[in-house]
Structures are given as structure tokens and as C-alpha cells.
Amino acid sequence: MAGLVFGDAGSAQRALSAFYVGEAVKLAVVVILFVVVLKMVRVAPLAMFAAFAATFLVYWIALLGALPRMGGTRRGA
């Protein structure tokens, strides 16, 4: 994937467009998979969506917690 984005000496606009396309494809795949699971598997939809939301929340909390260790901006400095 990185080769598609950074392979040739394209402009920054082209790289940004490639990232947007990648995010759109990822979102479409997630929606399609949710539909497939809801149609094919007997699940509690509210519990499934709650677990999905909790996963995202934990991911972002862990990412924010790792920022200072990765050289990011520090709060209060």
C-alpha cells in the first residue's frame, strides 16, 4: 500500500487523495461486513455495535497515552 502512495514522486495532493480513498474503502468494507454479520449470524446488534464502539474508544485512549512516548506534544509544557 505504501508503494501505491509513495511509489512515484507524486505531489502531496496525490498522496492525500490516496489516503482519502483508502479510508473510504476501509469504511465501505466495515459497513459491508456489518451488514453480512447482521444478515448471516444471529447476534444482538446493540451488543455488537457497543463492542465495536468500545474497541475504538480503547484504541484512541491507548494512542493518546502513547503520544508523549513517541515524541508528540506534551500537555502543560
Image (cartoon, helix red, strand yellow):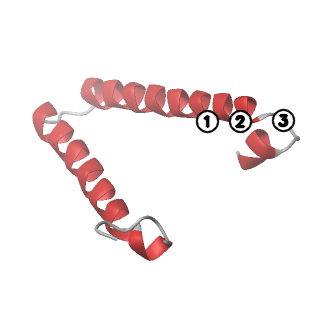
Q: Which amino acid does label 1 sit on?
A: Phe
Labelled pair 3, 2 in contact (Cβ < 8 Å): yes
Q: In percent of the image, x 32 and y 56: which residue is there?
A: 59
Disc 3 designates what residue? 10
Residue 56 or 64: which is nearer the viewer? 64
Q: In percent of the image, x 25 and y 33: which residue is there?
A: 41
Q: Which residue lies furthest to the front in this view?
A: 77
Instruction: Using a 10 Å C-alpha cutoff, classify the residue at mark 3 as few (fewer than 14 neighbours), some (14 to 19) or many (20 or more).
Output: few
Q: What residue type is labelled 2?
A: Ala
Residue 27 sits above or below residue 50 on the image: above
Instruction: Locate residue 10: give its quadrant.
Output: top right
User: Which label sits in the foreground, 1 or 3?
Assistant: 3
Residue 27 spot, x, y in % from top left: 44, 30
Q: Tell me the CA gap for discs 1 and 2.
A: 6 Å
Disc 2 designates what residue? 15
Secondary structure of residue under mark 3: loop
Q: Tell me the CA gap for discs 1 and 3.
A: 13 Å
Name the quadrant of the C terminus. bottom left
Residue 73 or 42: which is nearer the viewer? 73
Q: Which of marks 1 and 3 is nearer the N terminus?
A: 3
Residue 32 spot, x, y in % from top left: 41, 25
Labelled pair 1, 2 in contact (Cβ < 8 Å): yes
Q: Tell me the CA gap for discs 3 and 2.
A: 7 Å
Instruction: Using a 10 Å C-alpha cutoff, classify the residue at mark 1 as few (fewer than 14 neighbours), some (14 to 19) or many (20 or more).
Output: some
Residue 41, numbered circle: none
In the visual, does 51 lie left or right of 67? Answer: left
Instruction: Locate residue 6: give its quadrant.
Output: top right
Disc 1 designates what residue? 19
In the visual, does 57 lie left or right of 11? Answer: left
